[in-house]
Amino acid sequence: MAAATSVPTAPSGSQPTARQVATRFVDTWLLIVYALLAVVYLLTPVALIILFSFNDPAGRSNFTWQGFTLKYWLNPFGVNGLPEAVGLSLVIAFLSTTVATALGTLVAIALERYRFKGRGAVNSLIFLPMATPEIIMGASLLPLFVSIGAPPFFPLNFATILIAHIMFNISFVVVTVRARLAGFPRHLEEAAADLYANEWQTFWRVTFPLILPGVIAAALLAFSLSIDDFVITNFSAGKTQTFPMYIYAKYRIGIPVQVNVIGTVIFLVAVGAVVLTTVSGRRRR
Amino acid sequence: MGTLLKRHRWIAPVALLTPGILWLLVFYLYPAVQMFQSSLWSGSLEKGFEFSFSNYTNYTEGLAEYAPIYLRSIMYAGAATVLTALFAYPLAYTIAFKGGRYKNLLLFLVVAPFFTSFLLRTISWKILLGDESPILQVIHLVPFVPEDFRLLATPIAVISGITYGFLPFMTLPVYVALEKVDIRLVEAARDLYAGPWRPGGAIAGFIVGGGLATVLGIAFGWEWLLTGIAGAIAGTAIGWLFISESFIRVTLPLSLPGVFAGSLLTFIPAIGDYVNAEMLGNPDTMMIGNVIQNKFLTQNDYPAAAALSFMLMAGVLVVVAIYARILGTEELSASAGRL
């Protein structure tokens, strides 16, 4: 102690030299400029998708800029198969999100609340799908469906896509909801129990409202994963076409401009949904 | 109901777990086991398949024919992982320490690309790297660039496509780790006379920069010696000018778990990816994913495709198991939860 107090001036106590100030200023601004460049890099392809939704291509392929037009925005569904594909993607995303969010939330509650044998195994089973390349999950589902060889699994259809999407979404829901449950104020539940609420009432009146933001975040994540999934869907769709499958099918023969219009709309809706949940979450706090 | 639950405490967790876990057992774990079984099939989709352990030749033949493609996939995914780490670290560092009130906005911009279609973004890169793109025209203004230099349909295009696609997967976990770094530790290091890291920084920059550039040079198919020297020079300069002792001794070690988590989150999807290789590459840049999807969906050669998939999965599982043993899965799940 005596030694520590006998040191009169640490460098932080003294005034930093002009040179130190200059170095720190340059460091900071270099980093900020770099971060802005990185954001531009990340968003350039997105900007290009939006830009090319206003393109007026000469031929079938929408790869070179020809001129500005609004005609595809005014007629976003005027191409064969596209509205059906988008509709199917929305239905699958909605259903798989609903089921996966319900199943995943239950698992998250069980993992966070109870100590039981085999908890480690359950943890691993949740973790593994997130650590498996998508192509392997798709490629292992395909022989399963084919070897069952009977409806609803074969021929591949809507149901098989839905099964696959629920499967890969569950894990993401579990980890998102768990992150929310980790700092959960348990005493509120105990207070409810003290006030003669049964477990059912406690869950719906105390627990659920508190974890709801986490559940909503999980559902948003699941929805965005489902609506954009191509690799696993490619293995479980057969002749059924979702929006990404439609893009892939048209990739070689020329993608209609309407695809960019739909892609832009999906982007704007997703951004809007995130902004809305953040703003409302902030207000609640 | 209340007394029943209290008497049998195991009922509640089992009831909560059963539906979700059952789904994963039936549609994740069982198919993986079944895939191993189908890798030992022979026959065809039309005539029916037959199982026999003597069909292990699916493995030996697959390995003999596709070993170079496995190697290429590891190289491309590895190069992309190194590049995302190099790009993401300063980005995450800036957001964590200089972001101030714009932190959440910047994080939002980092994940914003995920709100558009992955396929459409890859097609955007096809346009950006194409022969008529402004980027290429600028490159051609540089002296000594050969007349026929192009980016599209080269390893550079494939690796940069993968790098772009998975950059947010690296940025988020690194950010999460950096944000947890206690700034008082850094200040304490400065108080204890941690200054610029001049000789050490230069030497470390020389070794790391040179090493990484050589690896990338090999992956890109460039003159690896020249790339290595260029990387070493750049690394030395960065190490001499920017790396401080407090960063090396405090911030970097504390953030390494985030870098490892990000590397795994990037490498795993990257090694199975086939969209970038298909859209941005050429037949010589084919990755193992292309082979697997082609065999499954075009040739209907399930046994061979299952054998190839199983080998890929085994490789990935070994990497994941080593990672989980050493570092645990908390960091990974936490960053996946933040997506």
Image (cartoon, grey):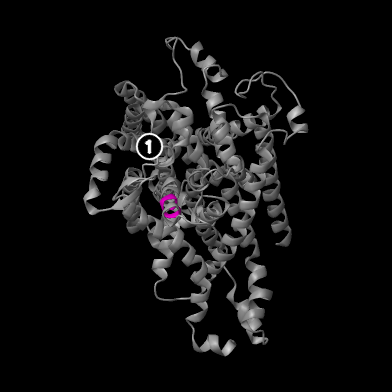
Quadrant assignment, res A186: bottom right
Q: Is residue A79 left or right of residue B146?
A: right
- Chain bearing mark 1: B
Q: How many marks?
A: 1
Give the x, y percent position of residue A22: 53, 32
Q: Is residue B111 left or right of residue B291?
A: right
Among all residues in the image, which is located at the extreme left?
B54
Q: Quadrant of the N terminus of chain A?
A: bottom left
Tell which residue pokes out farthest to the right in this image.
A74
Residue A147, position in %: x, y? 41, 54
Check disc 1 and report the residue beneath it: B291
Position of residue B335 in the picture relative to residue B267 (left or right)? right
Spot the residue most to the front.
Answer: B47
Residue in the foreground of this view, choosing between B323 and B287: B287
Residues in magenta, as a range: A141-145
| Nearer-the-camera pick, B235 or B302 | B302
Looking at the image, which is closer to me, B29 or B54? Answer: B54
Seen at 59% across and 38% down, the residue is A246
Q: Is residue B224 visible?
A: yes
**Element type where label 1 sits in the image:** helix
User: Residue A263 or B159: which is nearer the viewer?
Assistant: A263
Q: Where is the C terminus of chain A found, in terms of image quarters?
A: bottom right
Give coordinates of residue A191: x percent, y percent: 64, 82
Q: Quadrant of residue B263?
A: top left
Crowding at dot 1, Cα within 10 Å, few <14 / some 14-19 / many 20+, comes out as: some
Could you tell me what secondary structure mostly forms the magenta stretch? helix
In the image, residue B137 lies in the stretch drawn in magenta: no
Q: Mark 1: which amino acid?
A: Val
